[in-house]
Amino acid sequence: MNNIERKYKFARIRQVSAMLFVYAIYYVCRLAFSASKKGMIEEGAYTPTEIGYVGSSMLFAYAIGKVVNGFIADRVNVKKYIMLGLFVSALANLVVGFHVPALMLAIVWFVNGFAQAAGSPSCVVALARWWPKEKRGTYYGIWSCSNNLGEVMAYILSAGLVVLVAGMYGPSWAWKSCFWGAAAFGMVGIAAAYFFFGNSPEDEGLPPVPVDAVEAKVDTAKGQRIALTSSAVWLIALAGGFFAASRYAVIDWGMFFLQVKKGYSEAGAATIISINSIVGAVSSGISGIISDRFFKSSRKELAIAAGLLNVAGLSLFMLVPGCHVWVDVIAMIFFGFAVGILLTFVGGLMAVDYVPKCAAGAALGIAGMGNYIGAGMQSMISGYLIERADDGTAVLKGISFGNGYTLDYLAIFWIAMATLSVVCILIAGRKKR
């Protein structure tokens, strides 16, 4: 190994570590709101309706921001850009901690959603600049574990602060401390990006990652036009939208379904649902390695298998009546394993594979837009399919059969979304890279 290779090896280890940690901090600054909802409502700071609007504002800002920030990231110093996005996000958390009016909260959290969307394009553009296509899946998969790492960090931070601050200063300060803690973590992430995140090999005196002769002739503007006009990229975005609908259905409504339909306690439902996050972290981390090593960097085979496993897991979860713990555990293992792979592949990697590396951000932005539009639409449709009974309890609409079995419309919708995702992956997989 010569001196250049040694420098490259060290720089790449540092780069993937920085990407993993800094983007996990983005999640801390994103999830403070979710972790604080209960406290805000119980303290009368905001109504559930106001909180619902704020949550939606962030989702739609994130969908728009994915596209805009993706196209910008291809053209800028992504080290500076990821620091800027995190600074704005941390500042938004700091402001919200001062209990601003509901309308201002919605505006600030919309800005936070847009700033949050600078994180993943910056990381993926850096990934394309630092690794060749045949190794990209491996490190994309490792980086995608930052989602799970960020969730763990966010909820541990929030739980610790709530207990500590509530005991010392009272519950009215507890939910505020979640936002201030996230803002402080954001500053730590900015420092980590400054010292360890690299914009490109060339900025550190290393040769650029080699590309083939055709790609070498493509500049950023042309590469982004290729991304915008690629039917494969838009099919991946569509597949991601359908997949995200099924994924966020379980995240948003899975505990509710288990409690209302199957009779689980709140703690039992939470335990069952948490299984998919643990399994998903593992499958996300290994998905890129498997596709690079065993499928020559082709993602479609593993993505199709994961899509079918997603359908199977949801079907087991939704269609088997009654409280059968092991059935639901197996369903969440299937679902979680599928989610980890699909989150990596249709969440962005497959779209990035179809374009020159100079347009990685644009491809990720288009794919990400599809994901979050799907997530937002799911939330509205799933809510519509749940109604209130005369006694005020929540019930699921569905088709009743003579033997006492009811097929819920919610089950039909969720499983249909997962199935359509597989269809889109199959069609996209036929397109040439």
Image (tube, rainbow, N blue to C red):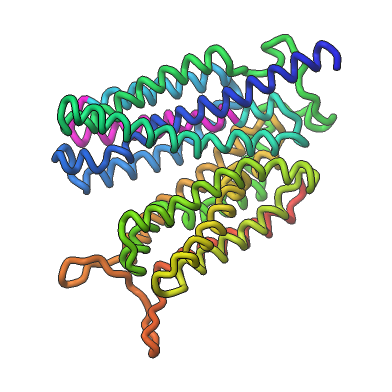
Work out whether 367 lies above or below 402.
above
Q: Give the main secondary structure, helix, strand or loop, of the magenta stretch.
A: helix
Q: Quadrant of the N terminus?
A: top right
Q: Which residues are magenta?
A: 98-123
Does residue 32 appear left or right of residue 229 in this picture?
A: left
Residue found 41% across the figure and 17% down from its top: 187
Asked whether 430 or 186 is in front, the reply is: 186
The answer to whether one can see residue 374 in this image is no
Residue found 32% across the figure and 39% down from its top: 35
Asked whether 377 or 234 is in front, the reply is: 377
Work out whether 217 lies above or below 394.
above
Q: For the view shown, which residue lies furthest in the bottom direction?
A: 402
Number of labelled discs? 0
The answer to whether one can see residue 205 in this image is yes
Residue found 79% across the figure and 27% down from its top: 217
Residue 267: x percent and y percent? 33, 54
Does residue 174 appear left or right of residue 357 in this picture?
A: left
Residue found 14% across the figure and 40% down from its top: 44
Which picture quadrant has residue 17? Answer: top right
Q: Quadrant of the C terminus?
A: top right
Asked whether 161 or 372 is in front, the reply is: 161
Work out whether 236 lies above or below 68.
below
Residue 348: x percent and y percent? 60, 42
Q: Is residue 330 magenta?
A: no
Residue 314: x percent and y percent? 50, 64
Which picture quadrant has residue 250? Answer: bottom left
Residue 180: x percent and y percent? 30, 24
